[in-house]
Amino acid sequence: MRHPDTWLKVRPDGLWCEPGGFFIDPVNPVERAVITHAHADHARPGHGAVLASAETLAIMEVRMGAGRAGRTQQALPYGEVLTLGGVRVWLQPAGHVLGSAQVAMEWDGSRAVVSGDYKRVPDPTCLPFEPIPCDVFVTEATFGLPVFRHPPPADEVARLLASVSLFPERTHVVGCYALGKCQRLIRLIREAGWDGPLYLHGALLPVCRAYEALGIPLGDLRPATVAAKAELAGAIVLAPPSAIADRWARRLADPVVCLASGWMRVRQRAKAKGVELPLVISDHCDWDELCRTLVDVDAPEVWVTHGREEALIHAAEAQGRRGRPLRLVGYGDEEEGEDAPPAESPNVAADATA
Amino acid sequence: MIAFAELLERLTLTPGRLAKVALLRRFFETEPDPDRGIGLAALTGELAFDAAKPGLIRALAEARTDPVLFAWSYDYVGDLAETVALMWPERRTNAQPPLLAEVVEALAVTPKAELPHLVAGWLDASPAPVRLAILKLITGALRVGASVRLAKVALAELSGGTIAADDIEEVWHGLSPPYDPLFAWVEGRGERPDPADAPVFRPPMLAHPLEAPDLAALDYPAFAAEWKWDGIRVQLVSTPAGHRLYSRGADDISAAFPEIVEHMSFDAVLDGELLVVRDGVVAPFADLQQRLNRKLPTARMLTQFPVLVRLYDVLFENGVDLRPLAFIERRARLEAFVARVQPGRMDLSELVEAPDLPALSALRDGARAASIEGLMLKRRDSPYLPGRPKGMWWKWKRDPLTVDAVLMYAQRGHGKRSSYYSDYTFGLWRELANGDEELVPVGKAYSGFTDAELVMLDRWIRNNTTQRFGPVREVEHGTAKGIVLEIAFDAAQRSARHKSGVALRFPRVGRLRLDKKPEEADRLDTLMRSLP
């Protein structure tokens, strides 16, 4: 048996499976890429052959435009094993967003699993994370500090709806990332009994339509752009985080600025962003989920790709595991929303300043 | 405690005044007694605990958490109580979060040695926001940005319009937590609480600014004039039951000015201006600011910044309410009072006599002392009414001083202005040794522009940003390209704490000087030479 560090390596382009001849979530265009999920920091345009779940490929196409999501694309259903250069490869649900997958690889008697981004709490828009026992577990650590513990998402949505009833003349504008968070939030709001219209910033609509086409109904969605200000009093509007406190939000009636993100756990983060109602809802593991997952997959060795790696490695070592920071660059946190477009289109931007 | 914790978080993050009042009102409407009253006391700063200190919180955290993870977490969050609240290891217990009143009562009576165990038990039973509220309560650092006044406005709303916030003001300082009689009164279940002899605050009478149309219509002989001094308005309340010095906003500031309270051995309620005065000369406001920054003055500050109260009015004397009397009658009472009692650290605000309005105007323009803001005009027959009754009292400020400055940096505002660059740092030109000139920041202005001008400035700033420092944008400010703002201000004073060497009092945008190029803006030298 050969240890995974002899065949799974960090290269400038990303994590490289040498015998398989492919990268996982490469940050630069490469010949062959396996993509865990369609967030922009993991799924980049311009690759040769792309292997991912059918849902991830569909969403990539919507976000990047036809033809930019890889020269050739291959959809791999969850659990179906493919052999690439002698490496047995399969995808397993990661519970992060629709289509998100862990990449499991076996070669020469050892097994490594790359989690991609993941979470453990149930999400009505995607399949739950399935732990795979392995020799090396490659994990993220976005919220890798014990101060990050996400409360039940239904409680956070209940706080939003309580605020809507307390301020019926104001518009609640909720910042949320366009892929995953937005659709999950819509479903959570629906599950809380709100079946009226939800208004969307134009940047959020395409992925919502893609989710619906993939079998996730989202109910009555309307563009916020064309709605009259009076119509938006008492309404819930979803928008990219970059838009909620900027010019775009001026069309709203005395908005209550909300942001759905794991970072909202820390009050100073909310205050610094001018958020009036922070909603602690995240598509990443919180600290407890990260630590529990290390136990569930029971890997003797844990590699950490990005986030707060030093704390998670400290916790892994306390569990008797070896920890190693990979220091992969190029993965941010989609929750910060920095790559969200500031406005829907040049025309709308011009309209917004009028 | 859950509702209180949610209220604290929302008050901390909510910029709007109306929204804060709505949040407070809902809390008072929905929380049971005595929790809502204890919550009111906590928000208005009426609670303090001696035994529980930050050291206790740190010790609890050390006992329950990994020291390495705690250090990293504290480093990330930056606030001790919040770090502990967020990372406290949750234990599944069947206990419910404690009630607010329960926490407050236990903190008051529990011996110090038993506190850690007690607090740990509460933290185990509570979700993170409640843990934070408990820890902030213990350390006395609620800081929610809700003034006492907002709480009174919210309480008044409970009465459905029959009781005003000013009515609550008049009984407030005679009440104590958990305020059962107050809630009974505003909810129509009980009588107005009688403050009896308690040294309660009375809502002050305020003035309207005198604009050109008002000036034209002014019936000059009906008015008396006084100087408008640049200090802070205070109310001196002295009854057989106690002596208090209140700010205009009803804050009890007695402890900060012991030398005033010491001389209040009379039975009266007086209205006046608190000023720093040396050898009979009123010092600039910045000197008084030194004293206002301190809850308890040091001996050195008492001698360095000596204060007195310049008396404007008398509201009560020997328990008799004089407020229904006309201003000139109260004025006569005040003069007699000062002559008879000769209270230390107090003097009488003089009436400014002029045969007609133009003569008065000339006096106003002639007063260039920085400590005089202008004139007050008070109707001779005006009773003392709370709030700002129309046509009774006018404040007639001097025309502001102005300087043409260049916009250098901009920052977004708060609340309704959070999407606009509405906070402006402006600068004046200074000559360098080599003969070149550079702009030096002189002050910040947040107001004075119209909505249309704000939109124009916001767009210009976004299109002419040269650098960003976090939330601050540096904008074009070369000699030929940039925005010139006419800055209006009430006074200028030399200052060692400012890079420019000068501090402006109440700077605001007078108007946009789009007709001027930055190189035509004023020189710092010119401003400095105009200073005394």
Image (cartoon, coloured by chain):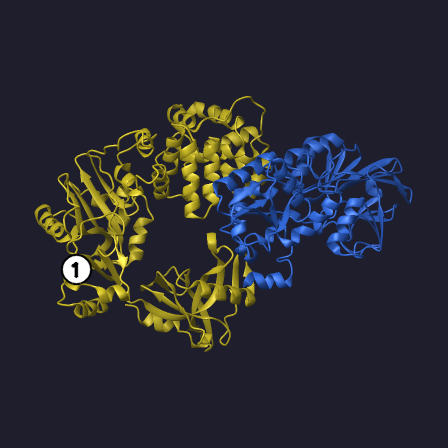
Chain colours: A blue, B yellow
Asked if B210 appears above or below A325 in the picture, the reply is: below
- Identify the residue at horizontal 39%, vertical 73% (top origin): B523
Seen from the viewer's position, the closer of residues A172 and A266 is: A172
User: Label 1 is placed on what type of residue?
Assistant: Phe
- From the top left corner, tell me how far across and down residue B145 is, in percent: 42, 44
Q: Quadrant of the N terminus of chain A?
A: top right
Residue B433 position within the rendered picture, expressed as x and y whole percent measured from the top left: 45, 75
Front-most of residues A269 and B59: A269
Looking at the image, which residue sits at the far top? B94
B267 sits left or right of B80 in the view: left
**Where's the C terminus of chain A, which quadrant?**
bottom right
Q: Residues within 10 Å of mark 1 (few under 14, many from 20)?
A: some
Q: Return the residue nearer the eye: B468 or A204.
A: A204
- Chain where mark 1 sits: B
**Considering the numbered disc 1 on the image, is that residue within a helix, a strand or a loop?**
strand
Residue B375, located in which quarter of the rendered image? bottom left
Residue B186's spot in the image, x, y percent? Answer: 32, 34
> Taking the image as drawn, is residue B279 in sight?
no
Q: Tell me what residue is drawn at x 18 percent, y 63 percent.
A: B219
| A318 displayed left or right of B464 | right
Q: Vertically, is A146 above or below B209?
A: above
Q: Position of residue B359 (x, y in %)?
A: 17, 69
Q: Please indicate, yes or no, whether residue B113 appears anywhere in the rendered image.
A: yes
Label 1 sits on residue: B223
Q: Name the foreground residue: A8 vs A317.
A: A8
Residue positioned most to the right = A86
From the viewer's perspective, tell me whether residue B202 is left or right of residue B129: left
Within the image, what quadrant is residue B487 found in? Answer: bottom left
